[in-house]
Image (tube, helix red, strand yellow):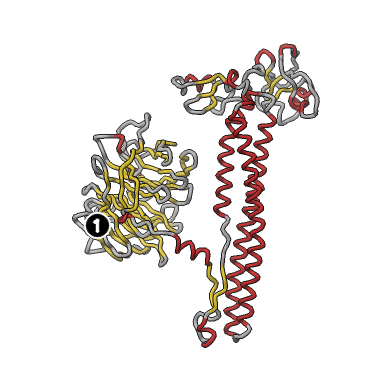
Amino acid sequence: MEVPGKQRTYDTKTLDATCQPCSRDGETLPADVYCSVCKEFLCSTCRNEHMQFKATKGHALLHATDLPTQDESTECCDIHRGELIKYFCLNHQSLNCGHCSVLDHKACDQQIISDVAKEFKEDQEYMDITGAFAELLKKIDACSSDVESSFDIVRTLCEKETSEVGQYRDTLNKYIEERDNSLRKVIEQMKSNDETLLDTLRQRCVNLKSKAEESIGKLKAKEINAIRLFIEVKRTKKIFQGLRSALAAIRKEKTIHQYQFKKDHATEGVLASKTGLGTVENIQDKKKTESLGSADLTRMQFAETSPIPVNSKDDKTHCFLTNMLLLPRDRLLLTDFENATVKLVDLKTSRLLARVKLQSRPFSMCLINETMVAVSFPEVRGIQFLEIKEQILLGDMLKVVDKYYGIAYYDERLVVSHYSEKLALTDMKGKVVKEKNNKENKQQPFAYPWYLTVVRGHQGAVIYVSDLGTSTITKLDMDLNILQTFKDFALLRGPKAIATVENQLLICGSRSNSIICLDMSSGEITNLSLKAKEGIISPQSVCYSQQLGKLYVACQCEVDINKLVNVFVATQRH
């Protein structure tokens, strides 16, 4: 290893490589050393320059006797720094160093990269990835062209409808003139929103193309070295999938407003009309609303399929899943109360993606935004924030005044429930803003309000609370005033976690061993018939993925620990 500040004699005869910086300038000079930080071969001149610059003079330089040959890998392991990648695991499709191979892949089918990479440039996998990138670039260009053409549509539509408004306004008086200004603002705002969206999409297309070209450039640059080419292709596959997903997202988001000026017929005869002049309607959203069907779970039948394994080798005891949360990108977050952990599952592969150990046993969760979750810790009187990405990252921990079990989020506030009797609203720092206690109400509506959720509607938001002690579901406004109480002692026995699916509320009947559906409009309560081989045993939490068409039920099952998360496929009844 090179020591900064000292000179050393090098024997370049033992080093079979050429200087990479010089080769980019068209020169072919023998390499003297290899920089393990920059991952480049350097000749003696480049080596001297490398040691003079402040940013690179501390880099570790490998000399001939320490250096792998060009038939070996010079890429370092992402996990074990300083260890070179030498193996490829066929089971996990991973690039491994010697440590990885021994510690994590001992029982796997592994290949020595230097053996399999010799003819890799002619391999079908390399041809497929380069061809796929070429096709992706074509699609990016087509999407960019489509975005550009949409600008003319937006402007033409704006001009046309603005002209209609102007022509109609000429026949009306000053009152109509005021309405005209109001409508123009609406149209201009839609135009501005469309152009802002398209500007963003245009830049994203440019960025996508740049990244795709960069990836192709990296592949081409490493064609001279089969090993590095092999490794780069394996790494680039993930980049390619990400770019393809990003392109799909752009196409999905490229939805501009389709609107038209609609005359108000009453205004033509009566200038005093309250809807004077007309309105601007988003006809595209209207069409979408009319085309979307309602997910009426009471009209569906549910057939059991393979359960999701959530046990981990690091668990100290049997799992007890108190809550589940459906996340974007078809992922499921679970609180394992007994093991004091939160677990992340990929619903498409039924694979446990991540697991994090917490300082106390978690009970319930709520989604703050697409990546942030709040978790209640009743035993330590705390609320833990988690950031959910590829892994589960610990955020801030709030100390709160009570043992909160249920938790929900709405408009920069948290709605929380005590072990018994009490509900509260807190700010995002845990400070109580409003509280509802049984002591203030002679009827004592709550006994054990362990679970709750906030439902957003056209007329505002409301809170639904499931009470284990009274076997009721209570509806409250955001000031914690009780609006309605739902009871059905035949079905609602021991209600636990609740989940919202459009205008329906799914409820776990822990003592009736069933999943209950409450229609929030009519108040009708229905037992969902789940075709399970051994039945549902003490369900604790439930959620439904409309995208996948599957119902997930977490149970308390001591007989079969592999059936903790049961999965049911939903189909329309004929």
Left or right: where does residue 203 sit relative to residue 95? right
Left or right: where does residue 76 sit relative to residue 400? right
Question: In the displayed structure, would residue 532 be above or below residue 560?
Answer: below
Image quarter for residue 210?
A: top right
Could you say whether the residue bearing mark 1 is in a helix, strand or loop?
Answer: strand
Look at mark 1 in the image and give the residue it sits on: 472
Mark 1, other Cα within 10 Å: few <14 / some 14–19 / many ≥20: many
**Residue 87 x, y percent position in the rendering:** 54, 21
Q: Residue furthest front?
A: 574
**Residue 522 x, y percent position in the rendering:** 30, 65
Left or right: where does residue 561 sit relative to residue 257? left
The number of numbered discs placed on residues in the rendered structure image is 1
Residue 417 is at least partly visible in this image: no
**Residue 549 x, y percent position in the rendering:** 38, 49
Amino acid type assigned to the residue bearing label 1 in the image: Thr
Question: In the displayed structure, would residue 573 be above or below residue 89?
Answer: below
Image quarter in which the N terminus is found = top right
Residue at screen point 69% across, 19% down:
2
**Residue 103 x, y percent position in the rendering:** 47, 21
Q: 327 or 45, which is in the foreground?
A: 327
Residue 177 is at least partly visible in this image: yes
Question: In the displayed structure, would residue 498 be above or below residue 362?
Answer: below
Q: 44 or 162, which is in the foreground?
A: 162
Residue at screen point 31% across, 54% down:
574
Q: Which residue lies furthest to the left in this view?
A: 490
Residue at screen point 28% across, 42% down:
555
